[in-house]
Image: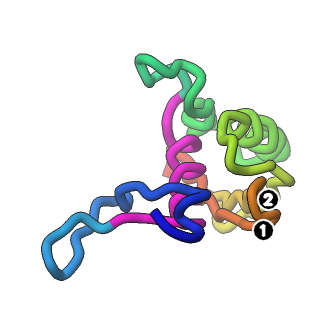
């Protein structure tokens, strides 16, 4: 690993993709951090056998009405899920209604090692579509 990948690591690209030479595509740098954040948000908390604290409770909100209560719960559960991601310092989450069945969560963070600011847009889809 060289340069920026030394700080953030390298992981398999998700969803899995292949390079032109047939090798598995890798994610490095900020892409690796964003994939890790996304993975924490989509994984139900307690579902990883040896890491029960990994994940979030967002799956419990899939059938909640799209109202201020849902927005408040998203603003509570997202930082809680990201507390285990040691490469970032969580700054804020902004909630925007994209449609009746989709809420976009703008997760704002700062990389601890470089102080670079990043944003991940997490689309939260409602289950009652």
- The magenta span reads 26-44
Q: Are marks 2 and 1 in contact (CB under 8 Å)?
A: yes
Q: Is residue 15 magenta?
A: no
Work out whether 12 lies above or below 68. below
Residue 39 colored in magenta in the image:
yes
Crowd tier of the residue under label 1, counting other residues whose Cα lies within 10 Å: few below 14, some 14–19, many 20 or above: few
* Picture residue at 58% right of the left edge, 57% below the top: 8
Tell me which corner region of the image, top left, top right, bottom left or bottom right, holds residue 4: bottom right
Q: Nearer the viewer, residue 35 or 58?
A: 35
Left/right of residue 94 with respect to residue 3 in the rendered view: right
Location of residue 124 in the rendering, given as x and y in whole percent from the top left corner: 60, 53
In the displayed structure, does residue 116 sit left or right of residue 17?
Answer: right
What residue do we see at 22% from left, 70% from top?
Answer: 18
The residue positioned 54% from the left and 50% from the top of the image is 36
- Residue 95, how many percent across, how many down? 78, 57
Residue 109 % position (x, y) = 78, 57
| Residue that lies at the very extreme toward the bottom in this rendered image | 20
Instruction: Please name whichever residue, 55 or 113, is drawn nearer the observer in this view of the structure.
Output: 113
Q: Main secondary structure of the magenta part?
A: helix
Work out whether mark 2 precedes mark 1 in sequence or the reverse, and give the earlier one.
Answer: 2
Task: State the residue in front, 76 or 79.
Answer: 79
At numbered mark 1, what does the secondary structure look like: helix, strand or loop? loop
The image quadrant that residue 60 belongs to is top right
Task: Report the quarter where the N terminus lies.
Answer: bottom left
The circle on residue 116 is 1
- The residue tagged 2 is 110
Q: Residue at x 56, y 70 (%)?
A: 3
Q: Vertically, is 101 above or below 77?
A: below
């Amino acid at each position: 690993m060289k340069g920026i990948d030394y700080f953030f690591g390298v992981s398999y690209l998700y969803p899995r993709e292949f390079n032109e030479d047939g090798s598995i595509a890798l994610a490095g740098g900020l892409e690796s951090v964003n994939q890790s954040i996304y993975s924490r948000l989509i994984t139900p908390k307690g579902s990883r056998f040896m890491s029960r604290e990994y994940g979030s409770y967002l799956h419990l909100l899939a059938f909640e009405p799209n109202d201020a209560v849902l927005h408040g719960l998203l603003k509570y559960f997202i930082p809680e899920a990201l507390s285990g991601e040691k490469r970032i310092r969580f700054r804020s989450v902004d909630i925007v209604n994209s449609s009746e069945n989709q809420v976009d969560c703008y997760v704002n963070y700062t990389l601890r090692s470089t102080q670079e600011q990043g944003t991940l847009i997490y689309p939260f889809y409602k289950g009652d579509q």
